[in-house]
């Protein structure tokens, strides 16, 4: 097990072309949806519209297992799956992330507004297959700046879970790596343990 402080990642876009890029906003995306141009699943990350690829079997398996564990350990009304959340006010205009699984601190139907915000969050989980670098970099920074208290990245290829806690305003977390032979539990519910292997496809 290794404990590290995750560094603030570099900007999502390279400086060479960033000044010439079109930066999209949530409002732009809402309008594009209304006009029928964004008729597919996507995330808005740092002003970039990223088309979400169809889930492969391993990704879908991990999402289902994470949901199964959370809904067994906590009230299922407190969960949200693959839907948008709000982030820090400074980031929210050009970011619309969709954690694979979110555990809230209240029932979803009691959340004010259309989407949960950082004040409603207890745990965000992403399943990383082809998206590992973004999940551990750009998305981790977004969630940390928003103050999401805990963030897990289930790394399918590495067969491990990166557990992020203690978010900082600079976009960093304290990160612990948990191998498939270990167990993990949210910091706010240390008795709600789960085997890392139970969140992964069979070896």
Image: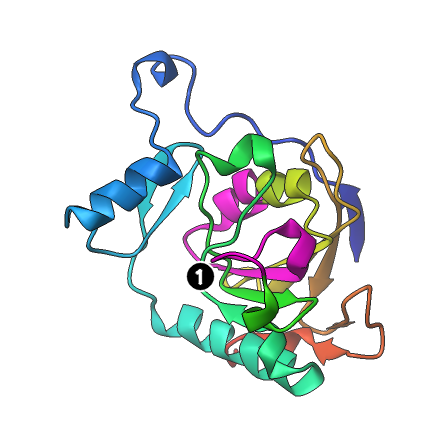
Tag 1: Cα neighbours inside 10 Å, few (<14), some, or many (≥20)? some
Is residue 42 visible from the viewing direction of this image?
yes
Q: What residue appears at the point 72 percent right and 62 percent down from the top-left corner?
A: 178
Q: Quadrant of residue 72?
A: bottom right
Residue 128 is inside the magenta segment: yes
Expressed as whole percent of the image width and height from the top left, the position of residue 186 reads 76, 67
Depth order, front residue of 131/29: 29
**Vertically, is 145 above or below 40?**
above
Is residue 151 visible from the viewing direction of this image?
no
First to last magenta residue range: 112-139
Q: Quadrant of residue 28?
A: top left
Q: Quadrant of residue 184?
A: bottom right
Q: Quadrant of the N terminus?
A: bottom right
Expressed as whole percent of the image width and height from the top left, the position of residue 146 reads 65, 42
Depth order, front residue of 59/19: 19
**Vertically, is 186 above or below 18?**
below
At mark 1, the secondary structure is: loop
Residue at the spot of label 1? 83
Expressed as whole percent of the image width and height from the top left, the position of residue 172 reads 71, 37
Depth order, front residue of 177/28: 28
Residue 68 is inside the magenta segment: no
């Amino acid at each position: 097990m290794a404990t590290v402080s995750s560094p603030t990642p570099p900007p999502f876009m390279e400086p060479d072309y960033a000044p010439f890029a079109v930066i999209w906003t949530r409002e732009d995306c809402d309008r594009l949806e209304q006009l029928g141009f964004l008729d597919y699943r996507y995330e808005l990350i740092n002003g970039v519209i990223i088309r979400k690829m169809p889930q492969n079997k391993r990704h879908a398996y991990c999402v289902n297992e994470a949901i199964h564990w959370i809904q067994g350990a906590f009230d299922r009304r407190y969960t949200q799956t693959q839907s948008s959340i709000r982030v820090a006010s400074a980031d929210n205009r050009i970011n619309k992330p969709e954690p694979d699984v979110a555990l809230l601190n209240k029932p979803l139907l009691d959340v004010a507004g259309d989407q949960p915000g950082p004040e409603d969050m207890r745990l965000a989980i992403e399943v990383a297959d082809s998206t590992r670098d973004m999940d551990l970099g750009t998305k981790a920074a977004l969630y940390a700046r928003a103050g999401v208290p805990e963030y897990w990245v289930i790394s399918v290829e590495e067969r491990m879970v990166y557990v992020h806690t203690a978010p900082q305003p600079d976009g960093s977390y304290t990160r612990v790596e948990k191998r498939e032979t270990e167990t993990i539990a949210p910091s706010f519910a240390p008795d709600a343990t789960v085997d890392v292997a139970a969140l992964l496809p069979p070896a």
